Image (cartoon, grey):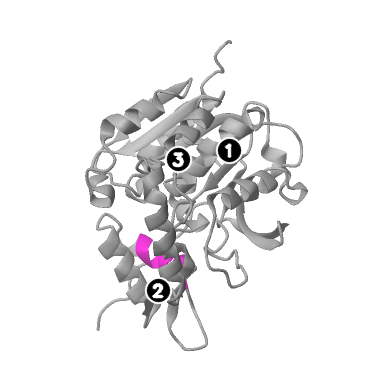
Amino acid sequence: MDSPTPIYSPRRPGTDRLVPVRGLDYHVIAWGDPSLITPEKPALFMVHGWMDVGASFQFVVDALAALEGDSRYILAADWRGFGLTRVPPTDSYWFADYVGDLDALLHHADLGLNGDAPVDLLGHSMGGNVVMSYAGVRPERIRRLVNLEGFGLPETKPHHAPKRLRQWLDELRTEATLRDYASVGAVAERLMKNNPRLDAAHAAWLAAHWAEERADGRWHILGDPAHKRANPILYRKEEIVETWKLITAPVLWVEGNETDVTKWWGNRYPREDFEARLAAVPKVEQTLLADCGHMLHHDQPDALAERLRAFLDAPALKA
């Protein structure tokens, strides 16, 4: 008889919260409480990437706790239409809504973040793009900013607009769907197929947060399929860079040494284009994690935690 798959046991379990944000009940996980906040160690707020969930940060939260104890107030949210942040039926999602949701969350009295005190802010992938935009337009709210592979998108040109709009209209004619699974174990297998560095124990724990069993007896991914539709609004690099220029917080850019962006965009987004964008940020440090791909917080939570602690606890530089 096969032995059951071991399941990861969190060192520092979080507490689930639902808070009202812009007409939605936003799911937020809290580790610790606001009593831990000090000027030197403000709240650390983390936001995930596309088709991920806030619980995905559990492994790096545990790694931080191993380094410094349970001394930091940490929060992670499920973006609208992901995880347990449910939304009414919708055709599409808009980038500006993520920025608006983040602004509301960072001022939310129920989370102890309703004052003007700065926070430390971290985003992965899509979330990394959101936090960069937010930090540019609300610089006074951010003490330190961490971007985990939020590269942005390939540059678009005005002549791309008609084709993109037509693509969006065509996609609206068909119901968006995601594959479902027979068991939570099958979800875990999918996670390990997506990322071979994710071991069985971590995958088994994450699968139960990444999907849920529904009335049909199947396990469904906690991500609205509408996220798959094309965005009819073009990504305008010039506007993004103008916002990045206004970031006043020190920024830590973290990248995996085995991330290959050509798998996403081919030759449409040259590395030199990204480096030029990042160079517009006034104060930025770059770090590379070894034996690591795009899911840095899964692949190397200990190494990431060590880098985060050093960056977040470094003395403030004099102006």
In the displayed orientation, state which residue is furthest to the top. Answer: 318
Q: Label 2's element?
A: loop
Nearest to N terminus: mark 3 or mark 2: 2
- Residue at x 29%, y 76% (from the top left corner): 3
Give the amino acid at mark 3.
Arg
Q: Which residue is mark 2?
A: 178
- Would you call the spot at circle 1 few (<14 residues within 10 Å), some (14-19), or many (20 or more)? many
Q: Label 3's element?
A: loop
- Measured as percent of width and height from the top left, residue 95 is found at 53, 50
Q: Measured along the vertical axis of the image, is residue 125 above or below residue 272?
A: below
> How far separated are the C-alphas under marks 3 and 2?
29 Å
Q: Nearer the viewer, mark 3 or mark 1?
A: 3
Q: Nearer the viewer, mark 3 or mark 2?
A: 3
Is 246 positioned to the left or the right of 161 in the image?
A: right
Magenta span has 298? no
- Residue at x 44%, y 56% (from the top left corner): 50
- Measured as percent of width and height from the top left, residue 211 is found at 46, 71
Nearest to N terminus: mark 1 or mark 2: 1
- Would you call the spot at circle 2 few (<14 residues within 10 Å), some (14-19), or many (20 or more)? few
* Residue 48, numbered label: none
Q: Which residue is mark 1?
A: 134
Q: Which residues are magenta?
A: 202-211
- Residue at x 37%, y 79% (from the top left corner): 181
Dominant SS of magenta comes to: helix
Q: Label 1's element?
A: helix
Decide: marks 3, 2 in contact (CB < 8 A)? no
Q: Which residue is mark 3?
A: 236
- Residue at x 59%, y 39% (from the top left corner): 72
- The answer to whether residue 51 is visible is no
Magenta span has 204? yes
Nearest to N terminus: mark 3 or mark 1: 1
